[in-house]
Amino acid sequence: MATMNRERSEDSAFAAGRNSWNRHYHNSVVQPLLTDLYQITMAYAYWKSGKIDDNAVFDLFFRTNPFQGEFTIFAGLEECLKFLDSFHYSETDIEYLKHALPQGIEDDFFEYLSQLTAKEVTLYAIEEGSVAFPRVPLIKVVGPLIIVQLLETTLLTLVNYASLMATNAARYRMVAGKHIHLLEFGLRRAQGPDGGLSASKYSYIGGFDGTSNVLAGKLFNIPVKGTHAHAYITSFTGIDELKTRVLQHKEDGTTRDILELAMEHRTNLASVLDVSTDESSEGELAAMVSFAIAFPDGFMALVDTYDVKSRTCWLVRQLAAIRRIVSQLDLISSSHCHLASPRLLTRSGLLNFCAVALALNDQGYRAIGIRIDSGDLAYLSCLARETFERIAERFKLPWFSKLTIVASNDINEDTILSLNEQGHKIDCFGIGTHLVTCQRQPALGCVYKMVEINNQPRIKLSQDVGKVTMPGSKNVFRLYGADGHALIDLLQRVDENPPEVGQKVLCRHPFQESKRAYVIPTNVEPLYRVYWTDGRVAQVLPSLEEVRERVQASLKTLRQDHKRTLNPTPYKVAVSDNLYNFIHELWLQNAPIGELA
Ligand SMILES: Nc1ncnc2c1ncn2[C@@H]1O[C@H](COP(=O)(O)OP(=O)(O)OP(=O)(O)O)[C@@H](O)[C@H]1O
Ligand SMILES: O=P(O)(O)OC[C@H]1O[C@H](OP(=O)(O)OP(=O)(O)O)[C@H](O)[C@@H]1O
Ligand SMILES: O=C(O)c1cccnc1
Ligand SMILES: [Mg+2]
């Protein structure tokens, strides 16, 4: 839909193939030293205190959903598996650690580190792209204590931002609706280059249609799309600068001067639209003509650059223009486009664009559309659409009314909701800063907690009940209700029998004794799969496209009230009666009895 538009190519050497794991791209920053120092100092202390054969279970989970929402999209799993696959301290890593760690560390420890791999680790996880809820471990890692401890920080950094980003993108998709195109434009504003790449990848998974980030396109086979910047328009000051003016007809090859055609159309349009051409910028016209000649099949223009007076004046003129057109055409209901001033409309960006689009049409090409990057996006999109419709009718070019309107400029979830309420005619949002920086919540608080060691459960107590960990190795099941929606996630001890369809199961709040309910599930979905065991990935991993589809399918299983933006209903996460009693016994055993003086 935009000028430079490279769709997925199935034969791309970089594509994540359906049945083959994409090992082509491994982020070289993700390596064992991408961790906190304390993991390695702990590893030494574990090693020195003879814990080398200890086995542990760790849970990776978050405690609250981001963005004041009631769901999270789990993402980052494939990268975690790549990390396990390549886990190995290189010679230079070991050399570095010899300097970085405190003096006195025995050489045998470094020898031990140099042999360490993730071969003895088993990793269970819920499917990447699934909706997930607080306290349900997204990942369970089982294996030798030292290695599973060493994985903590890296697994967290791989899951936290990925899941936050995918959730953010999914929320933008929900408010925009399924018919609006969403493009990620955030690289320039992202938290560094790696943040930018991750943002592009996980916003695609979350439901965006493409990115402007070219490297993300190459590495992840995501559609790359874009328009052009204000600089392109401002780089031309007048029509004399045009080196090429001619364009061959798409079919018959005859050559015409596009500038000349555009100027004729502009004069004509000015009278059709009842405006003057006095204020239209010649530099802008030249820029648009040159861009149209470069991309005759993909002409898309930024229409808000010029402004012979000021942007504000421009906006006022634009708004006035809508009123004028509306009153002339009586096409838009007043509830849709509320107009501000009776003055005349812009005579620059939109007029120049339409003139060039008509010139291209003379040569057998169809323009793509416009981008608006400032001002009142609801008003301006209505103005543009009305102008397009008017021209479509006047010149008997029905496609003109369907030209794409892209809007950008500091858009966030609330802006889209507000634009929806106002009524807009935007087809595509280009979203950067607020999407990639996750403006409403900059981090998802995933943690990684030990729940078992040498088959003995471990519990971490806290004054804050919400922070008490769920001890022991657990299984998770999603129970579905009579209406087919997901009803509750149930955590059980691993040795319990799974819940069964049609059989009553007691679901308990993990910490509040009186909160419990019987559920008769219509469907029981075991959430865990083994993804890594015996030193290998144990599943056929889905492609990025499949994970993206999984997100939408998984969101559909949630009731609408869990997904609404304002005061959504919390989704229930429960424990079995058995796990409840187990937690509370262990809690009592571990909580010291106080003394009152
Ligand atoms: N109709 C609208 N309803 C709600 N928010 C809007 C609407 N139109 C635009 N916005 C948002 O309002 C903000 C306007 O930004 P700002 O005040 O910087 O104006 P601007 O038009 O970008 O100015 P400039 O011409 O200097 O670029 C942006 O965040 C934009 O997404
Ligand atoms: O607004 P965002 O959601 O971050 O989307 C990306 C922005 O990046 C570009 O311009 P840039 O912001 O660099 O300059 P401008 O605001 O002066 O146009 C583009 O025109 C968008 O405005
Ligand atoms: O292609 C675009 O229009 C684009 C790309 C990045 C940032 N802003 C806009
Ligand atoms: Mg901007």
Image (spheres, rainbow, N blue to C red):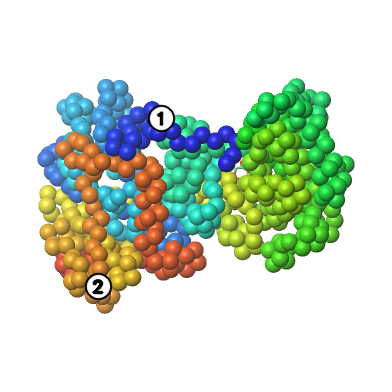
Front one among 490 and 292: 292
Determine the image quadrant of residue 243: top right
Q: Which amino acid, by three-letter code, is at mark 1?
A: Ser
Position of 219 relative to 578 (above/below) = above
The structure residue drawn at horizontal position 25% and vertical position 34%, both measured from the top left corner, is: 85
Can you say whether 12 is above or below 457 in the image? above
Residue 229 visible in the snapshot:
no
Q: Position of residue 17 (x, y in %)?
A: 34, 35
Task: Identify the residue shown where x is 33% and y is 48%.
Answer: 128
Label 2 crowd (10 A; few <14 / some 14-19 / many >=20): some
Judged from this view, the residue extending furthest toward the bottom is 514
> Which quadrant is home to the C terminus?
bottom left
The nearer-to-camera label among 1 and 2 is: 1
* First reached walking from the N terminus: tag 1 or tag 2: 1
Q: CA distance from mark 1 to mark 2?
A: 48 Å
> Considering depth in this image, is 472 or 587 the residue closer to the camera?
472
Residue at 18 percent across and 65 percent down: it is 499
Q: For this view, does 147 lie left or right of residue 173? A: left
Q: Residue at x 49, y 36 (%)?
A: 7
Place residue 40 in its image quadrant: top left
> Residue 200 at what x, y percent from top left?
47, 41
Q: What residue is shown with label 1?
A: 12
Residue 328 in sight from this viewpoint: yes
Percent of width and height locating residue 71: 39, 59
Q: Disc 1 beta carbon < 8 A from ligand 3?
A: no
Using the image, tell me which numbered label, if any, was put on residue 519: 2
Quarter the N terminus occupies = top right
